Image (spheres, grey):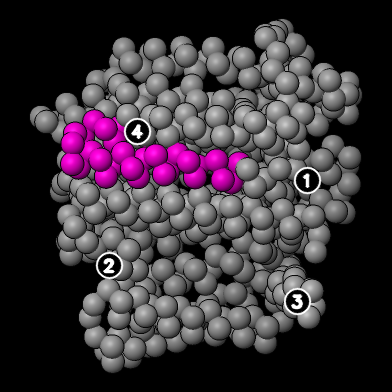
């Protein structure tokens, strides 16, 4: 098995554990507060610092990786580390300033992010946000540590970084129900801080040594500033889309923000497990191949990455559409999360699932452009898709309410993918388009057949077994298992190239066991 495959599988396992706990956190929140003003206020308070700094943090981490390799190639490891510390210290100063501004203008921020909030819901959201806004300092430093560890080919630790955070948040939510709602928001702040604290010792072990050094006139910092602008706008597109969705959702019936969030978390679990894992491993490699001008291996890596995402995500997308209601019911419907909440979340999940493949490919193709040090193309295409998302949001929310917001997000992501593919062709010419189209067609055919089989199997088994958590879990497990086997057989019959990578890995594992 190649180092890339091993790293990807290792990160997937780490991500599965971390996201499993993250999903458990959502289940605890749903069970404790359902779709209520407390859950809406909490999620808004969580979202504001994410939008404020995730944009900057992701941008810095994205630009840091290729520039680190450039500094290392030109000036050596010592100066590359010095450059990293320069970025680290600039981020500390920037985050502290942003946190202070956030605390001063908390009320205005909440009103921007949730225009429909008023009365007690608004007051709770403001108080919650004043606490969570301080987390941006730790979030910023965590992104830098993640980028450094990935540069050093350590992908597992960044994947596990959210494990202690989620454990702390879960405990704080449970305690908040019994004692005071503010316990969960303070627990969230402490949890976020542990993401950075958890990664730091491993970064030190990988060679990181802190230096109190700031030089904003450094030529690589200046180069970084030129690259950051377009990446910042490109990354901001996703956050702005989320902000617009939640802002409009705040004008709908109570609990709409929470329903969107729970559906988005289900969608995000798939993205983190497969797409983020592939992207995190492939990006440093693409950056290195680009700096070495190794076009043949670069294109080969691009094709394999894109086709792997298509092969994995299309069946999950179809499966989520077919089984949306039973999935949401099984995972969430308990405590304060009732049948109404299940219906709202399932509808949002179906609409998000339509664009699931596009969400994944957008991230991977964006990484390809960033590895080529082209930050403008993703920015322009993303801005077009963002404008389309806002327009569609305003139109569709009138007719489809909550479902319209999720559908608008999916449509804009699909448009963005076609724009990015067109731009990539102009940029490098051939990038394996014929192989990508072939894999896409075969995967769709196999997934549609799988979806039909899964639908009928679930209905037959659930009718035989009846209602009840255990019985519904068995019905869902059997239908998903039969669907997965059906899809696997079909992609082998249709001779999808990427399936050989998976079968080779399985054969090697079996040989080792033998």
Give me the disc on residue 329: 2
- Secondary structure beneath dot 1 equals helix
**Which of pointers 3 and 2 lies earlier in the amino acid sequence?**
2
Mark toward the viewer: 4 or 2: 4
Image coords of residue 312 (percent x, y): 59, 67
Is there CB contact under 8 Å for labels 1 and 4?
no
Name the quadrant of the N terminus: bottom right
Q: Distance between the residues labelled 1 and 3?
A: 31 Å
Mark toward the viewer: 1 or 4: 4
Q: Does 337 sit left or right of 27 as displayed? A: left
Magenta highlight on residue 239: no
Task: Give the labeled residue for mark 1.
Answer: 285
Task: Give the class, few, some or many, for how many residues have Cα within 10 Å of label 3's Cα (few <14, many ≥20).
Answer: few
Q: In which quarter of the image is residue 438?
A: bottom right
Is there CB contact under 8 Å for labels 4 and 2?
no
Task: Give the labeled residue for mark 3.
Answer: 513
**Which of pointers 1 and 4 lies earlier in the amino acid sequence?**
4
Mark toward the viewer: 3 or 2: 3
Image coords of residue 418 (percent x, y): 58, 55
**Which of pointers 4 and 2 lies earlier in the amino acid sequence?**
4
Relative to 443, residue 60 above or below: above
Magenta residue span: 158-185
């Amino acid at each position: 098995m190649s180092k890339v495959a091993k790293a990807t599988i290792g990160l997937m396992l780490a991500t599965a554990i971390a996201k499993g706990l993250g999903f458990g956190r959502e289940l605890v929140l749903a069970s404790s507060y359902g779709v209520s003003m407390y859950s809406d206020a909490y999620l808004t308070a969580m979202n504001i610092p994410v939008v404020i700094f995730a944009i900057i943090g992701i941008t810095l981490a994205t630009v840091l990786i290729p520039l680190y390799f450039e500094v290392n190639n030109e000036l050596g490891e010592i100066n590359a580390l010095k450059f990293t510390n320069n970025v680290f210290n600039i981020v500390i100063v920037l985050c502290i300033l942003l946190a202070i501004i956030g605390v001063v203008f908390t009320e205005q921020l909440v009103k921007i992010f949730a225009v429909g909030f008023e009365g007690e819901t608004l007051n709770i959201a403001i108080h919650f946000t004043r606490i969570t806004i301080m987390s941006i300092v730790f979030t910023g430093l965590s992104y830098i540590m993640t980028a450094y560890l990935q540069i050093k080919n350590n992908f597992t630790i960044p994947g596990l970084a959210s494990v202690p955070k989620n454990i702390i948040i879960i405990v704080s939510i449970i305690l908040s129900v019994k004692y005071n709602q503010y316990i969960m928001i303070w627990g969230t702040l402490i949890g976020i801080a542990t993401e950075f604290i958890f990664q730091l010792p491993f970064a030190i072990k990988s060679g990181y040594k802190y230096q109190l050094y700031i030089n904003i006139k450094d030529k690589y910092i200046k180069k970084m500033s030129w690259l950051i602008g377009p990446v910042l706008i490109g990354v901001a597109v996703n956050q702005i889309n989320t902000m617009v969705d939640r802002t409009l959702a705040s004008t709908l019936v109570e609990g709409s923000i929470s329903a969107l969030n729970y559906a988005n978390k289900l969608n995000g679990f798939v993205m983190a497990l497969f797409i983020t894992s592939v992207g995190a491993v492939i990006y440093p490699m693409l950056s290195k191949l680009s700096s070495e001008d190794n076009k043949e291996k670069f294109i080969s890596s691009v094709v394999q990455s894109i086709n792997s995402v298509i092969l994995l995500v299309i069946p999950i997308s179809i499966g989520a559409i077919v089984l949306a209601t039973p999935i949401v019911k099984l995972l969430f419907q308990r405590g304060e999360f009732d049948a109404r909440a299940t219906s709202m979340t399932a509808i949002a999940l179906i609409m998000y699932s339509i664009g699931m493949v596009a969400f994944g490919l957008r991230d991977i193709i964006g990484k390809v452009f960033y590895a080529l040090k082209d930050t403008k193309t993703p920015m322009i295409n993303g801005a077009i898709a963002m404008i389309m998302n806002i327009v569609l949001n305003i139109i569709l929310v009138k007719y489809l309410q909550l479902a319209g917001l999720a559908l608008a997000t999916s449509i804009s992501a699909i448009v963005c993918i076609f724009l990015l593919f067109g731009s990539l062709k102009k940029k490098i010419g051939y990038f394996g388009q014929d192989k990508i189209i072939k894999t896409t067609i075969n995967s769709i055919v196999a997934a549609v057949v799988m979806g039909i089989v899964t639908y009928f199997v679930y209905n037959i088994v659930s009718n035989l077994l009846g209602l009840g958590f255990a019985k519904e879990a068995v019905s869902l497990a059997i239908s998903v298992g039969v669907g997965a086997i059906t899809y696997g057989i079909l992609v082998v019959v249709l001779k999808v190239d990427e399936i050989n990578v998976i079968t080779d890995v399985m054969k090697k594992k079996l040989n080792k066991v033998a």
